[in-house]
Amino acid sequence: MALFKRKKKEEKPQILKIENIRVNQKADSSDSAIVSIGTVLRDAGYIEEPYIQGMLNRDHSLTTYIGNDIAIPHGEYEVKDYVKKTGLAVDIYPEGIAWGGGTVRIVIGIAATTDEHVAILQNIAEKLGDMDVVEKVVQGDPDLIYRVLTGEAA
């Protein structure tokens, strides 16, 4: 008989899953790209439907285009209760989309239950601050994109 039970190692929830990374996407507007990435977040169980409208509202009041061909749509504070768990989804638009005065080729949808979005944004800026890396991501497959964003890329 064992005197002590071994604690199971708690698994950290996976914020980005490879199946939530889509390449070669097409959209005719930033709004349709936001709805598309929001649908991925919803279908993956990160958010409830009303969060998608909050993502649109946020982008309309203050663009989520951050430069380097990247947009990071996320919901405004008023819809945070519709986030079930923190997660990301990534869509790649090789042809680009006009967005907030720039062109976007990488759309990273963010759902965060707390102020985790700050660390997520910091990580995105760190990983995609170099346009050479952005080019690799835009041309890459989901596996490469996952490795770059999770820090597993060589």
Image: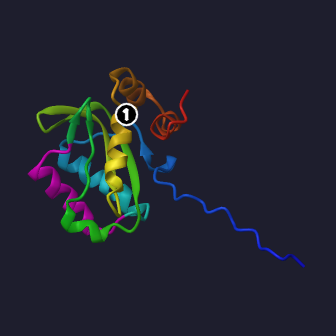
Q: Which percent across, then down, holds residue 104?
A: 24, 34
Q: Residue furthest right?
A: 1
| Label 1 residue SS | helix
Give the residue drawn at x 37%, y 55%. Answer: 40
Q: Residue furthest bottom?
A: 1
Q: Locate residue 105 relative to residue 88 in the image: left or right.
A: left
Give the residue drawn at x 16%, y 31%. Answer: 102
Image quadrant holding the N terminus, namely: bottom right
Amino acid type, label 1: Glu
Q: Residue furthest front?
A: 3
Q: Nearer the viewer, residue 9 or 144?
A: 9
Q: Locate residue 95 relative to residue 88 in the image: left or right.
A: left
The answer to whether any part of residue 9 appears in the image is yes
Magenta stretch, residue numbers: 47-64
Q: Answer with the quarter of the image where residue 122 lies.
A: top left
18 inside magenta stretch: no
Q: Answer with the quarter of the image where residue 107 lies.
A: top left
Give the residue drawn at x 84%, y 77%. Answer: 3
Q: Answer with the quarter of the image where residue 95 lies.
A: top left
Q: Which percent across, then down, holds residue 147?
A: 52, 36
56 inside magenta stretch: yes
The answer to whether any part of residue 92 appears in the image is no
Labels in figure, total: 1
* Mark 1 lies on residue: 126
Magenta: main secondary structure equals helix
